Amino acid sequence: MSKQELEVLGQDADCCTGVSEAPLTDERAAELAKVFKALGDPVRLRLLSMIASRGAGGETCVCELTPAFDLAQPTISHHLKLLRQAGLIDCERRGTWVYYWVLPGALDRLAVFLTTPTAAAEAPA
C-alpha cells in the first residue's frame, strides 16, 4: 500500500475532529469523501463488515468472502481493492490465498468523526 493510500484517514490533528466540532478543510473533506464513497456500496459495506467481525487482529481469507456473494471473483477483488485504497483494510498474500484485516484505528477515526458531543450542560439538572 502506498504512503498516499495510508494517509487517507490521516494521522494529523484534524483526523480526529468530529463533524460538529469544526468545519472541514477542502483537503480533509476530499479524504473523507473517498472513504465514504468506498462505504457507499452495499457489497463493499458487507465485505468490510465480514472482515471487521473477526475482531481485533482477526484476518479473513478471500476464500471465505467470495462465496457470500453472487459475484465473480474479479468483482470481489475490485471491491476489496477500493476498500484498501480508502485506507480501511489491508491484505497479505499467503500462497494462493489473500488474507484481509481492518487497519487499526480506521473505523475508530470514522466513529470519532461521526460522533456528536453531548454537553453535560445540555442535560436536564
Image: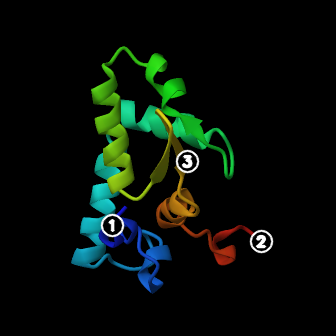
Q: Residues within 10 Å of mark 3 (few under 14, many from 20)?
A: many
**What label does residue 82 carry, if any?**
none
CB contact under 8 Å: marks 2 and 1: no
Is 101 left, or right, of 24 in this rendering? right
**Residue at the extreme right:** 125
- Establish if 56 lies above or below 78: below
* Residue with the mark numbered 3: 101
- Establish if 43 lies above or below 1: above
Disc on the earlier residue, 3 or 2: 3
- Establish if 23 lies above or below 109: below
Three-letter amino acid code of the residue under disc 3 = Trp
Q: Nearer the viewer, residue 65 or 35?
A: 65
CB contact under 8 Å: marks 1 and 3: no
Between the C-alphas of marks 2 and 1, the distance is: 51 Å
Which element type, helix, strand or loop, lies under badge 1?
loop
Q: Number of labelled discs?
A: 3
* Residue with the mark numbered 2: 125
Which image quarter: residue 28?
bottom left
Between the C-alphas of marks 3 and 2, the distance is: 45 Å
Between the C-alphas of marks 1 and 3, the distance is: 17 Å
Residue 41 appearing in the image: no
Three-letter amino acid code of the residue under disc 1 = Ser
Which x, y percent locates residue 99? 53, 41
Q: Nearer the viewer, residue 105 or 75?
A: 75
| Residue drawn at (28%, 49%) of the image | 37
Three-letter amino acid code of the residue under disc 2 = Ala
* Residue with the mark numbered 1: 2
Q: Residues within 10 Å of mark 1 (few under 14, many from 20)?
A: few
